[in-house]
Image (spheres, rainbow, N blue to C red):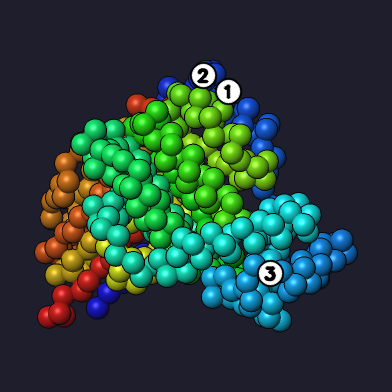
Amino acid sequence: MEASSPLSQLPISTPSPNTQKLPTKRNLITSLMEATTLRSPSFKEDTYVLSNLKSSEKKALNDLKSKLSSSQITQNPTIWGVPLLSEDEKADVILLKFLRARDFKVSEALNMLEKSLAWRKQFGADGIVEEELGFKELEGLVAYMHGFDREGHPVCYNAYGVFKDKEMYERIFGDDDKLDKFLRWRVQVLERGIKLLHFKPGAVNSIIQVTDLKDMPKRELRVASNQILSLFQDNYPEMVARKIFINVPWYFSLLYSMFSPFLTQRTKSKFVIAKESNVAEILYKFVRPEDVPVQYGGLSRPGDLQNGPAKPASEFTVKGGEKVNIQIEGIEAGATITWDLVVGGWDLEYSAEFIPNAQDSYSLAVEKPRKLSPSDEAIHNSFLAREAGKLVLSVDNTTSRRRKVAAYRYIVRKSALV
């Protein structure tokens, strides 16, 4: 038998007597985040509901259909398995993406669409998902689809820090042929994500991109990065609902100025920036903790999603100068409790204790107090209770003044002999 945890146990907080608000120190990253916000107004995702379109936008859609039907580039144009000249609402969603990318200028949208259809035919994009490109070592490491955000968008994670290793870099990008093969693989990853989209009005029609900038060799990857950006922007309009940059280093301003000329203003408006110290806090705003990879302050480990949807986690906040005790009660004798716990950015003390119900029994230190560093991943542990009692998980943040996001979940499996 199993029992899983909803938001059932309220944390017990112990404030520190010496808490005072520290002045906020402005640094390059803080200034950059503010500057990027000023340059990039908040992004609002399209619903693709026809009744919500302006009359000028409806006219542009009809005009694009008319021009496409008389285009000489292809007969019965199809993209992502959708016939573009059909009366299917999926066709409208795709055509509206191209129109939106060109500010509803019909001629420019048609030109973009025709070039994209030609590129897909030349590149072989329609069948690329089934290709074996030989990048097993990069899967789940450099670019990969992993779970969904809170609104149901598929999430694609990108991390290029592994290429700081010169041997790895040469093996993947050593010459033009290798670079071309990598670009095919990167398109393959994106096409896998697109297969998860609905292409229906009011549904999930775009993905979330999370890009980890930690240890990214900016100079060496300039050519590859520019080609990926150009290729995606030219052929995958409005496919990304949000671009979240995490572990942003001090030189991000240089990267931004380098990439900026290749990006539209609408693309820039989708940017969200997270410093190394608040990666989990930013990601939790968009993705539930159980779907965030453990290396980014979540609870999702490699292979977890192959077993079906992740078990929900309970979220809470650890304030600066506070100790939080999570009490899991009602554990019967012979039951096994398994738990996951994480605090974004850790840098605090963690412990676990089992307290029996019997008055004459002694508490048992399941995990002795230990300091966890910012790089530590989520706790995953199990305990077999020899007698009835409760488990207390403690996170002690009394030496810090930083507020931290956190999450936990547990399962209690009763003994088969009961």
Q: Are marks 2 and 1 in contact (CB under 8 Å)?
A: yes
Q: Position of residue 146 (x, y in %)?
A: 39, 59
Q: Dot 2: what SS?
A: loop
* Residue at x-position 48% and y-position 43%: 227
Q: Is residue 244 left or right of residue 266?
A: left
Few, some or many C-alpha atoms within 10 Å of disc 2 (few <14, some 14-19, many ≥20)?
A: few
Q: How many marks?
A: 3
Depth check, front residue: 241 or 322:
241
Depth check, front residue: 332 or 23:
23
> Upstream in the sequence, badge 2 or badge 3?
2
Q: CA distance from mark 2 to mark 3?
A: 55 Å
Q: Quadrant of the C terminus?
A: bottom left
Note whether residue 270 is visible: yes
Q: Position of residue 395 (x, y in %)?
A: 32, 41
Closer to us: mark 1 or mark 3? 3
Q: Is residue 13 left or right of residue 121?
A: left
Residue 31 got which mark?
A: 1
**Residue lying furthest front:** 72
* Residue at x-position 49% and y-position 39%: 226
Q: CA distance from mark 1 to mark 3?
A: 50 Å
Tell me which amino acid carries mark 1.
Ser
> Upstream in the sequence, badge 1 or badge 3?
1
Q: Dot 1: what SS?
A: helix
94 up-or-down from 314: above or below: below
Tell me which amino acid carries mark 3.
Gln
Identify the residue under disc 2: 27
* Residue at x-position 52% and y-position 25%: 253
Tell me which amino acid carries mark 2.
Asn
Residue 171, image quadrant? top left
Residue 72 got which mark?
A: 3
